[in-house]
Image (tube, rainbow, N blue to C red):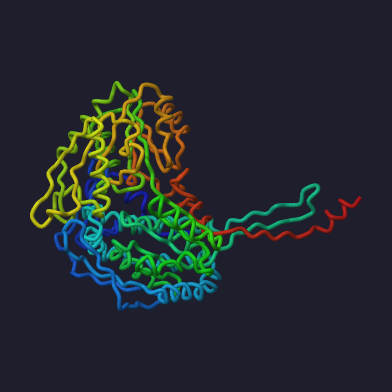
Amino acid sequence: MEVNFRKVEDDFMKPETDTRNPCHHGAGEGSTLLFDKHTERWVVGLSDTLSTEAPVRTGLFIGGQERQTAETISVADPAKPGVVVGEAAAASAADVADAVAAAKAAYPAWSALSTAERARQMAEAIVGIADDRDTDAAILSQENGKIRMEAWVDALVFEIRWNLALMIADDVDAGKTLPVVPGIPVTTEVSYQSLGVVTIIVPFNWPIAILAASLPHALLAGNTVIVKPPPSAPLATTRLVQRVAEKLPAGVLNVVTGKDENMGALIQNPDIAKVCFTGSVNGGKRIMEMAAKSLTRVTLELGGNDAAIFAEDAIIDDVHMDRLFAAIFDSTGQICMNAKRIYVHRSRMQEVVDGLSARLEKAVIGYGLDEGTTMGPLHSPVQKAFVEEIIEEAKDSGATVLEFGELPGGDLAGGNFLRPAIVVDPDPELRVVTQEQFGPVIPIIPFDTEEEAVRVANDTWGGLCGSVWTADPATATRIGNQLVCGYVFVNDHGATRLDLRAPFGGMKQSGIGREQGIEGIRAFQDTRSIGVIDPEALAQMAH
């Protein structure tokens, strides 16, 4: 199947020019995509006009209809104490039951369509999705805390992932035939079938982009879906999902927001065939426990304690230090696949510390919508307190802790801001090493041998991503093949470098299952085998 999605690989991946026509990038009116040749990353030239009518109000979207609720959730601005960004509908248990019923009712007709027809309708459903991207980004920046450029890219990745899923529509139904062989007088046709109603639960940090790692795959496979946005940052995600859902048949795509006590049916209702959850390890364990009562299938994409290994021959120049800085401090450190531990050959240790320090000295901590801000607040006071605690613990242990930047004042005083920090050669038993920090702090730890580096990198509870930094491809392959994780980067690390076509997911406590690519499609399908006895082959067996 041929899908026109603005030639994503050409237009988004190749740095041929510094400025492109925004109409070829889904940039939205007034915004442009720029390629920074120094950092090798796309940046967004955003319009000066913000459309952020406050407070934002979102409802539920169930069975093709928007639904308001008497009770709402107030969404706070993590940068400005006391400021409410908007109100999201708080679904009751009855609302959730209605969403499940609507998705169940829509399932037979949706699953009966050919994959090509589903793909056609899905392609039409995101036409014009970029028109509100500036507003989506501004709202997401305020409710999440991330800088506006990151919020804009969050929404952009939704479109890219959606269209990448449509590109593999021809593979969705690719079954196989098992022919008669001696001793087995049966011809068996193995095909794929959809599951039914799927719940997708996304986190606060990159909610729109993360949603698209599974939503288009679930729909394309023939399932109907209920999306649950994060309760602390639901507004932009709800707006975007509703715009898409309005263009699909009623009940195929639904969105509910609300308090956790009313959300249990999204997991435990017997009509839910699968739950796809992205979030913390503890959250994933709770989801798995709830789903186990009805043996509901789960895909869990959970936290990580990613290790980056700098070999003795690593290239440590401005380009690579810019990459490392982004790998650690994008979204103020609040990304599951950010680098969380840096292991550096002892002979190169100071170079890495100096390289990161030089970049952190230029960090501008502030409001995500303000021009020039490079690092926003943490999303919650609880997370801020945890990161402060592990930094203080490192100081008390005698480790060298380098802190950078100035905290903002004025109406931002008291926001969830932290000065970014480097912890040099800490005790490996400290929590800044053993736990996922999910904040602007990074331990840098020396090693002496490759074997030691691999051992300590793997000595952790998680296995989401890892990276190898070396000038030698053979070293990259050798070390990379020993890392116990789902994805290995070479000379880079992090979400902005993830191949969105590749299967993604973790090992150990970093998750179960895979998203993206054909593996992401198969996660929302099961096999059906139809075996037909071959009389002639059966007769031959009798002789």
**Is residue 480 toward the left or the right of residue 443 in the image?**
right
Q: Is residue 81 above or below residue 43?
A: below
Q: Nearer the viewer, residue 120 or 95?
A: 95
Q: Is residue 192 above or below residue 393?
A: below
| Quarter of image, res 36 | top left
Q: Nearer the viewer, residue 15 or 236?
A: 236
Q: How many marks?
A: 0
- Does residue 392 show up? yes
Q: Nearer the viewer, residue 335 or 397?
A: 397
Q: Position of residue 234 (x, y in %)?
A: 30, 64
Kindly identify the residue that appears in the image at 36 percent across and 28 percent down: 470
| Quarter of image, res 70 | bottom left
**Is residue 202 toward the left or the right of residue 299 in the image?**
left
- Does residue 40 show up? no
**Is residue 396 toward the left or the right of residue 237 in the image?**
left
Q: Nearer the viewer, residue 311 or 4?
A: 311
Kindly identify the residue that appears in the image at 45 percent across and 71 percent down: 252
